Amino acid sequence: MWEEELQCSYNLQMNDWDEFTKGCIFARTYEPVRAEGQMSAESVFQPNPAFEQLYPRLTKLLKKARLTRLQTARGERHLLGWTDVTGRFIGWLVFPPGYEGSYKASSDLHSDHKLLLNYFGGVDETSYAPELEQAIPDFGCDSQWTLNLNFWLGERDCELGIDSWDVYFEMLQEFFENPIDPNDFITFAVEANGNSSAYNKRDGTLILFAHDHAFSYVSPYPGCPSGLYTFNNCAKFSDWIETVAGQWSELIS
């Protein structure tokens, strides 16, 4: 069935990978890479109604992507690619879809996250076209929350707790009216400098632990002098997904 849906030549398949490497400094660590087929993502991305209802923006974005199935030095990956407003490639290198349940934080993931993983495996690397900085005046971390992330959403990367900041987090406890247990949270996205986005594993509410940032879209966590923040107009994990999907949707032509 996979072979029947192939739409492009081997050279075109590898062209998306070559373009991806231009905007992702870590791409070469996946080589050697072998492309096994390229098609529209819509032909293989078939989410159930619950996914489409919870993640409508992401659903629409994924259905617009080109999908290349890759075998890499670091395992199977799927390359999702779009053409941006400058006519260049942008994309995500993602894990194959499917909640596996075998990783360190798997059993603690929120049900909305597990639903997501069943159809979208999470992002290992992203690639932006450098020309976007000139084409979009406000292009940056405020308008693109995934710009400097090391990973986001992948089941194997998620951690119980606030990444590696649990000790520092505990030092902040004296400022909270109600103590917060780091183990109530799942870290699902980590920035290159260690800033970590996490959600409460029970209700999906978000926090950002950031020791160094200049974001305008967060506010200090109530009672906390520094380090811990909430997202403005983005209360839950599903809201974060939809916000990011909307940000990427604005980049594509």
Image (cartoon, rainbow, N blue to C red):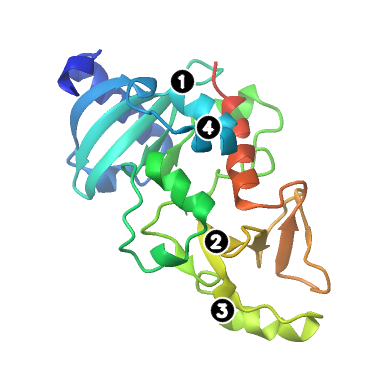
Asked whether the beta carbons under mark 1 and mark 3 sit within 8 Å of each other, the answer is no
3 or 4: mark nearer the eye: 4
1 or 3: mark nearer the eye: 1
> Which residue is pictured at 78% across the width and 79% down the height?
176
Side of 170 relative to 222 (left or right) = left
Quadrant of residue 140 within the rendered picture: top right
2 or 1: mark nearer the eye: 1
- Does 152 appear above or below 132? below
Q: CA distance from mark 1 to mark 4?
A: 14 Å
3 or 2: mark nearer the eye: 3
Looking at the rendered structure, the secondary structure element under dot 1 is loop
> Which residue is pictured at 24% across the width and 14% down the height?
8
Asked whether the beta carbons under mark 3 and mark 4 sit within 8 Å of each other, the answer is no
Sequence-earlier tag: 3 or 2: 3
Percent across and percent down for residue 75 are 21, 48
Sequence-earlier tag: 3 or 4: 4
The residue type indicated by label 2 comes to Asn
Percent across and percent down for residue 58 are 53, 33
> Disc 2 designates what residue?
193
> Which residue is pictured at 48% across the width and 61% down the height?
109
Looking at the rendered structure, the secondary structure element under dot 3 is helix
Q: Which mark is residue 64?
A: 1
Q: CA distance from mark 3 to mark 2?
A: 16 Å
Inspect this view and state whether residue 188 appears. Answer: yes
The residue type indicated by label 4 comes to Glu
Asked whether the beta carbons under mark 3 and mark 2 sit within 8 Å of each other, the answer is no
> Disc 4 designates what residue?
52
> Which residue is pictured at 49% across the width and 15% down the height?
87
> Disc 3 designates what residue?
166
The residue type indicated by label 3 comes to Asp
Q: CA distance from mark 1 to mark 3?
A: 39 Å
